[in-house]
Image: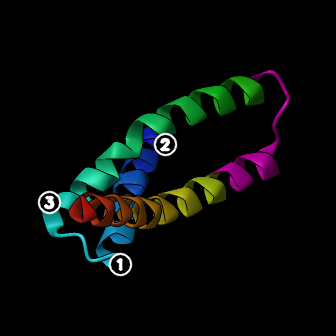
Amino acid sequence: MIVTSFIAGKIIGGFIGAKIQSFNVRESIGMGIATVPRLSVALAVASIARSHGLFNEDIMASLLIMAIITILVGPTLTKTFLSSKAKVEERF
């Protein structure tokens, strides 16, 4: 249940971030899905650290907030990068 919630959150957050940057629906879904592999690694590491007593609930909450911020910023950075690349290619 928790993993499903995190995955859905990553997809939805990536979708929202992409829509804010004027990606179409298909591209927005793709951006959301593209963030899922990063989530699985972060969750695995955080779970292991928590099970060994290295992380408490506050740190886990901070990691969740960080994950939300990164999925909202990711589409913006991607669009900026891809737009810059397209402009450079148009010049040549």
Residue 8, image x and y in percent?
A: 36, 52
Three-letter amino acid code at disc 1? Ile
> Residue 25: x and y, percent?
16, 67
Name the foreground residue: 74 vs 71: 74
Query: Mark 1 sits on what residue?
Result: 20
**Which segment did they paint magenta?**
51-63
The mark that comes first in sequence, 2 or 3, is: 2
Q: Which residue is mark 2?
A: 2
Mark 3 lies on a secondary structure that is helix
- 39 vs 47, left or right, is left
Front position among marks 2 and 3: 3
**Residue 28 has which mark?**
none
Please, what is the three-letter code of the amino acid marked with disc 2? Ile
Would you identify the image quadrant in which residue 3 lies?
top left
The question of residue 44 being in magenta is answered with: no
Q: CA distance from mark 2 to mark 1?
A: 27 Å
Horizontal arrangement in the rendering, residue 78 relative to residue 22 (left or right): right
Question: Between disc 2 and disc 1, whose residue precedes?
Answer: 2
Please identify the quadrant where the C terminus is shown: bottom left
The location of residue 74, given as percent across then percent down, is: 46, 58
Mark 3, residues whose alpha carbon is within 10 Å: few (<14), some, or many (≥20)? few
Query: Which mark, by number, is residue 26?
Result: 3
Q: Is residue 12 left or right of residue 43?
A: left
